[in-house]
Amino acid sequence: MILGKASPEDVNLHPIKYQWAYDLYQQAVRNTWFPHEIALKEDLEDFTKMTEDERHSVKFLMAFFNPAELIVNRSIALGIYPYIKSPEAHLYLAKQMWEEANHCVAFEYVLETFPFDKEKIYNVHLETPSMQAKEDFIMKYLKRMTEDKLDVQTTEGKKDFIRNLVATNIVMEGVWFYSGFMVALSFRQRNQLRNFASMIDWVLRDESLHLKFGINLIQTVLEENKDLLTEDFASEIRQIIIDGVNVENAYNKDLFPRGILGLNADYVNQYVQYVADRRLEELGLPTHYNVTNPAKWMASATDVLELVNFFEQQNTKYEVDSNSDKK
Amino acid sequence: MEIYITKRDGSKELFNADRINRSIERACFGLVDPITKVTQIATDTKVTLYDGITEEELDLATINAAVQNIKDDPDYDKVAVRLLLKTVYKNVLGDYGKDIEKFKKLHKENFAKYIKQGVADGILDSRMEQKFDLEKLSLALDTNKDELFIYAGLSSLLNRYSIKDRSQKPFETPQYFFMRVAMGLSYNETQPTEWSIKFYEKMSSLEYLAGGSTNINAGAINPALSNCFLLEIHDDMAHISKSVSDVMMLSKASGGIGASITKLRATGSPLSSNNTTSSGPTPFAKIIDTAIRAIQRGGKKKGALCFYMENWHLDFADFVEWRHNAGDDYLRMRTADTAVFISDEFRKRVASKEDWYMFDPKETADLNELYGKAFSVKYNEYIKMAESGKMRTFKKVPATEQYRQIITSLQATSHPWLVFKDTINLRALNNNSGTIHMSNLCTEICLPQDKDNIAVCNLASLNLVTHINKRQIDWQRLQESARIAIRQLDNLIDINKLPVPEAVKSDSENRAIGLGVMGFADALEQLGIPYDSPHAYDFADKIFEFISYMAIDESANLAKERGCYKNFNGSEWSHGKVPVDTITKLEEERGNPIDIDKNSKQNWLDWDSLRAKVKKGMRNATLMAVAPNANIGLVAGTTPGIDPRFAQVFSRNKISGKYLDINHNLVTELKNMNLWEKIKDKLIELQGDISEIQEIPQHIKDIYKTSFAVSPYAFVEVAARAQKWVDQALSRNMYLDSRDVEKTMDIYFTAWKKGLKSTYYLHMKPRHSAEQSTVTVNKSSALGKTGFSSAFKKVTNIESLPVLSNQPEVVVEPITKIIDGKTYKVHGPSDPQEQYTCDSCQ
C-alpha cells in the first residue's frame, strides 16, 4: 500500500515496489537546470517595447507563479509526503520540492531583472482577488489536513488525501499552470521574450513530470483502495476540477482585461477548458467541455522535437547525466 | 461583442469580416480547396482579435492564423507566405490595391528610388548608385520568384537580412534584397550591371545563397562580408587584451570566431614580471565569453565564438568543464562554445591504452606548431623529460580516461566538439604560410594563423535541390552555379572591409573562400535515396567531386584573369596537388590507411589536366567548406548543409522566432498515396517519426527517417566521402539516440579513422519532453489504468452526469474540414517549391 503511516521498513529503498516512482526520480534528476543559465538582456529589451497590456500580462503571470510554486511545496510537504509510505515516492517528491523551489527562484530571477516595483510585486497575489480565489481554492483542501485531524487509514481520510492531491496536482499544476505556460510561450511565437520562453520550456518539462507522478499516484491509490471507487466520490472529484476551471475565468479576465495580439480572456478560458477535459479523461472521468484547442501553434511550441541553433538560443533539451543507458 | 480596428492614422473602424476574408481568399489563389482554407484562417483569426486591435496587428493575426494550420496542411504555408509578402509590399511600396499589374510596375519603378534613397540616407554604398544601370537592373527583378519561399524562410530573410531604413521600417522587398547583394559584390567587375544580373538570377532562384554576413552587409556603407575569423591568443597580457578587442570588433563585423587558447600558460605557471604565478586560461576566456555577450553581430546576429584547446594542455580537464551548467559561474562559459583539437598521437594512445601526458605550454611551446610525425617525436621527448624529472610540471592520465571524459561531457553539454589537428594540417594545401591551430566556430574552416594573421573565410552555399530536374541532378546547371558562385566569392574579397589589420592582411593575401552545399538530405529524398545507404554515400562522392573540380577550375581561370593569391608559391596547389591527392600524405604520416573508397566516381572529369592548370596558379588559397547553413538553409527552404532531416516535423528555435518545419517532400508523397489526412495527427504525436505508423509503406519509411534513427556511421560515411574532395572541412552535426559511452567513443574513433577533419554539435535525443498540447494525451490509458471510470459502470450515458456549474459554457463553432484525396491528386504537387523547381529547370 502506498498510503499509510510509515513503518521502519519504509526507508528500505529495495526491493522497489513502485518502479514508476523510481524511474520518474531518475528522469527528474537528469532534467536539472538553473535559472542563471538563461540570459535575459534581450528579453528586457523586448519588454520595454511591449504594449501596456502585454506588460501587464507578463507581470500578472509572474506575480501568480512565484508564490504558487511555494504553495505547491506546502501542499506536498503537509498534504502528500507525510501520508505516503513508499521510499521511492519520497525520493521523487524530494526532487519535486527542489524543483518547485527552483521554479520559485527562477521567477524571482525574472522579477528582479525586469523593471517591476520590487516593493509591490511580491504582494500582487495578496491584493488581487482573482489570485486570492485560486490560492484559497488550494488551501481549502490543504486545511483539512493541517488544521483537522486526518487518519489516512479511513475512507474519509483517503478521500481527503485525494481531494488535496487533485486540487494541487491536477488543478493547480495540471490545469492552471498549463494555461500560464501557453500564455508565456505565446510571446515567443511573436519573437518576443525568447529566453524567458526557454526558461518556461524547462519549467514545463519539469511540470510534465510532476503531473505524470501525480496521475500515477492517484491511479495507484485508487487501485489499492477500491472503497474510493464510488460514483459519488468520482463526481465530487470531477466537480473539483470543474470548480477549478471556473475560478480561472475571473483570473483570466484580470490577466487580459482587453486582450493583446493573439490572446484574450475567452481564448485562454477555452484553452483551460480544453486542458481540463484532458485531465478529466486521464482520471477516467467524463469530459465536460468538449472544446477544441484554440492554440494550434502549441504544436510548434511544445509538441515536436526542437532543433536549436546553439549559438542563438539556449538549448533546453540537454540532460545532465550521461552513461545512464547502462544499468 | 463589437470589435473596432485602430487604423494607422489612429481612427477607429468597425471590424469588417468580409474584407479580411477577401484578402485571405486572394492569398489562397491556385490552391486546392480554397474555401475550406479561407474559412479556417478566418475562424482562427477571429478568436484572437480584441477591441482596439491595430491594423498591423490584424495583419499579423491573419498570418499567425495561417501559420498555425501548416501542421495540418503545408498549403497553409503558401497562404502565410503570400499574406506576409503583402505586408512587406505594402510597407515598401505603399498601397497598390488589388491590381497585380500595378503592383509589378510599382515594384520595378520603386527600385531606383530605393537605391538612391538608401545612398542618400547613408545606408547604402554610393557605388550602388554610380556603378550600375538601375533601369536595366529593375527589368531583371522578378517578383514571381517570391513564390519560391516557405514561410519560415521568408520570415527569416526579412528579420535577419533585409535592411531597414533610418526609422527601422522595412526598406526592401525580397527581390530588392537579392539584387542588393548581387550589386554589392559586383563593384569591381568591368561590366557590373551584367554580372549583378547573373548573380541575382542565381540567388533569387535559390540556386546558391551567400553567407549570412554577406547577406546583411553587401551593398551597405560598411561592407563587412566575411563569415568566419580564426585567431590565436598568445601568451602575453598585451596580446590577450588586444584579442579581447579584436574579438569585439570582429563580432561587430558580424563574423563567427574561432579562438585558440592552447598557447596560454597553465594555472600555477610562473610569471617572470612579478614573481607570482598565472591563473591559467580560464579567467581570460571568461572575459571573452562576457565580451561576446555584449554584441549583437551586425545588430542582427548574436556574438558567437568557439575556443579551441589542444588536449595536452595542463588545464585541459578544466576546459572540458567550461560548458557544464553547474559550478562557479566564473569558471564556466555561458556563451562561447568549446572544441578540442586532437592529434593522431592521442588517438593512437587511446587505441593502445597508453597514458596521456599534459604539459604547461610555457615549457612545451613548440607542440602547438607541430603536427603529424614531428608532433609525436617531440611529444615523446617531453614525456621522457617529464619522467626523468626535467619538467617543472606535468600530469598524466590513461588516454582512454581522458577520451571518456571528453565524450561524457559531449553527451551532457554537447561540448567540446572533436576536431582533428593532424588530419587538418596534413591534408592542407594552404599551410605553407603556417600551422593551422584551430578550426572556426562551425568546424568547417581550415586556415593557418599567427600573431600577424587572423584567418578569414568567406562563404556561399549551393542548393542541390534547385539543381534537380526530372529526378536527376542537372550537372550542367550545377557547373554553372559553382563557377558563378566562385567568381562572386572572389569579388567579395576586394570589397570586404574588416576592422582589424591582421584580418585584412590574411584575407587579401590568401583570398580564402568556402563554397558549400545545402539541401543534401532534401535532394536524397527527392531522388528516393535513403540517407544511410551506399547510394547516398556514392551520391555524396559524386556531388563533391564534381563541385570541387569546377570550383578549382574556376579559381584557376580567375588566376589567369586576375592573378594568383599572394601566398600561392610554396602551397601544395603550386606543386600541382588537388585535395584528393593529400590523402596519401595523411596515410604516410599516420602510418595507417584511411578507411575509405578512394576512387573517383566521375570518370569523365580530367583531373590530370586540372592538376597541370592548378600548378600554374590559383586565385584562392581555399575553395570549399561546408557550413552548417542553419539560416540560409532555412531561407532556401531546404535541409541545411549535409545534415539529415531532423524529423519529419519539428520546431526550430531561432533568433528570428520559433518555426514549425514540416517535410514537404513527405507530405506530397503521402497526399499522392491518399494517406496524409489519415496520419497527420500521428505525425505530431510521434514527434515527426513515421517508423511506427502502420499505414505508411516501408520504402517511404526508409527514405524518411529522423536524424536519430539514421545510423551515426552514415553521418561519418557521408562526411568522409565528401571530405575526400573538399579542401577545407564540413560541419558534421551528429545525432545520437544512444547514450552508451562506449558506442559513442567508437563512433568518434571511426570518424577519425575515416579521415574526417572535424565533427560539430552532438544532438542527443531527449528522453523526456514536455506534455504535448495539440494531440490527444492520456497518460493513464498509456499506463493501462482506468482511474475512476469503473465507478461509473452502471451509468450508460455519461452526459447525464449532473453538473453543478452555473457558469456559461463557451460555445465553439465546429470546424469543418472536407478534403477529397482524389481532388488532391489531380492538382499535382502541393509543394509550391517543387512546382517551381520543375518550371525553372525546363
Image (cartoon, rainbow, N blue to C red):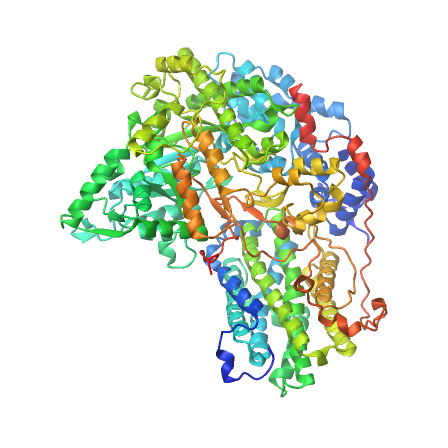
Question: Is A117 placed left or right of B686 in the picture?
Answer: left
Give the x, y percent position of residue A262: 70, 50
**Res A158 → quadrant:** bottom right
Q: Nearer the viewer, residue A273 or B769?
A: B769
Q: Residue at x 81, y 41 (%)?
A: B819
Question: Is A279 placed left or right of B527 in the picture?
Answer: right
Q: Nearer the viewer, residue B702 or A120?
A: B702
Question: Is B1 placed left or right of B658 in the picture?
Answer: right
Q: Residue at x 69, y 25 (%)?
A: B144
Q: Nearer the viewer, residue B227 or A59?
A: B227
Give the x, y percent position of residue B524: 59, 32
Q: Quadrant of the N terminus of chain B?
A: bottom right
Can residue B111 be seen at all in this image of the molecule? yes
Q: Quadrant of the C terminus of chain B?
A: top right
| For residue A291, above or below residue B148 | below
Can residue B371 be seen at all in this image of the molecule? no
Question: Is A48 placed left or right of B89 in the picture?
Answer: left
Q: Nearer the viewer, residue A284 or A189?
A: A284
Give the x, y percent position of residue B756: 41, 35
Name the outermost residue toward the bottom.
Answer: A149
Give the x, y percent position of residue B731: 46, 36
| For residue A228, above or below residue B709 | below
